[in-house]
Amino acid sequence: MISHHTLLQFLNPLDWIIFFAVLAATFACVVWGQKKKQELSESEQMSTVELLLMGRRLTLPIFVATLVATWYGGIFGVTALSYEKGIYNLLTQGIFWYGSYLLFAFFLVKKIRNFDVMTIPELAGKVFGPKAQKLTATLNFLNLLPLAYTISLGLFLQAVFGGSLFINTFLGVLLVTLWSLWGGFRAVVYSDIVQFVVMILAVFLIVVFAWAQMGSPITLMNQLPATHLDWTGGEKTSTILVWGFIALSTLVDPNFYQRVLAAESEKTAKRGIIISTFIWFFFDCCTTLGALYARVALPNVDPNNAYLQFAIQLVPHGVRGFILAGILAIILSTLDAYIFNAATSVSYDFFKLKDKFKTWHHHIALIAVSLASVLIGFQFEGNVVEVWRTLGGFSAACLLFPLLVGQWKPGVISEKSFCWAVSFGCIGIVSWKVINKLFELSTLDEFYIGLLCTTLPLIPSLLRKKA
């Protein structure tokens, strides 16, 4: 991350005013959401469905805003990939994922909405049984523990305000935790409204100013290395296809499910995902172009810092503060959703408190998850991305096949088969990582191993049912 001293050289009072004005607008929107909540009856305000799904009242505009904002938290990762490999980023982090979004919209929304549930683990419990719900909740929790986003927030705040990484991380997560405690999912959603607008405008403005000062994308193409205009990025086909399979993890993503279940209707959820896909495409085009302009303007800087460093030098005062607010919005909008859903996995799903569930159960879990994210993330700071990727891989690779089969063909897979297959997939991922680290047998991605180890044990069940 760019240093605090370097960043301060490019900021003036107007930038700070704009930056804090955006933060104030975010808090104001959260307050507005709480005032809207007062229009509900007392029983509705205190209900579990209000806490976890905002009473299933997401209208189309709000659905789109919260889905788009939540889904895009890795701004520095994707811009670094564009800086290093060009349009390869648009293929692996964009096009493959658009296909998964549309599959979700056309083939899963109706299925999910037919189940009277509030979470993925609860859905697994309905389809397979209570043990499946707990196992799914455990993997969901590992996937949702936002270690990478926690550290990203700390590093960003440290660059902006200075001071120690731990204090910045703690205060940033504390802020997110407080509004989630106060307003539940409603607070997460209403904060996303401002964050959605700011993040889209921020990446768009970077392209506008770069185009004006450095020429059109056609001019840019002539100044880039040839490899940056190669869709493969110089990678092998097997490496590229891994991203296609990883994109399928969308089909079992808890944040997607939460918003689909919170939508006011099936039609809203389906149309919302389709509209969001077009917005993601626009956003990805902006971030890819911005990173490519950065590659031409600053060819010898750290790829992880290039986009921010280029943007801050490019735009005028005032806009610089807005850009910083936009980057902060991208991180916060994902972090709060992950912390909130991780707390739900613990309090609502793992301990299966559906009949006895109280708001304070979720509050305790939320505080615990927030503290764990800071402490674990700080402890593993150097290796956090690798740890996070492995933990997330359990959920994506091991739940994908059985959950999709369970939704489309209920009763085909027994609870015992589900638990054995998912457990075998997790063991396969860990074993592959350990063996590969010791002996360097293959570059085959662990996602394939987890998916294979989960799918194979279920084939006999599928064949018996077919017969």
Image: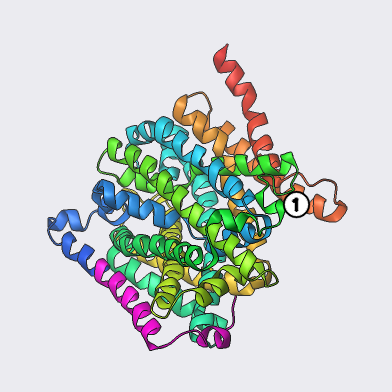
Pick the residue in front: 238 or 416.
238
Mark 1 element type: helix
Pick the residue in front: 359 or 439.
439
Query: Who's the residue at 33% across and 36% down the image?
Result: 113
Can you name the residue that lies furthest to the right here?
439
Amino acid identity at mark 1: Lys
The answer to whether residue 394 of the structure is visible from this angle is no
Query: Who's the residue at 42% across and 68% down the image?
Result: 326
- Residue position for label 1: 433
At which x and y percent is residue 363? 36, 66
Pick the residue in front: 210 or 199.
210
In the image, taking residue 398 as reference, residue 315 lies left or right, namely left
At which x and y percent is residue 87? 61, 50
Q: Is residue 282 above or below residue 210?
A: above
Q: Quadrant of the C terminus?
A: top right
Q: Is residue 75 magenta?
A: no
Numbered range of the magenta stretch:
1-29
Pick the residue in front: 313 or 363.
313
In the image, taking residue 373 as reference, residue 303 lies left or right, namely right
Query: Who's the residue at 71% across and 41% down the image?
Result: 449
In the image, taking residue 463 as reference, residue 323 lies left or right, namely left
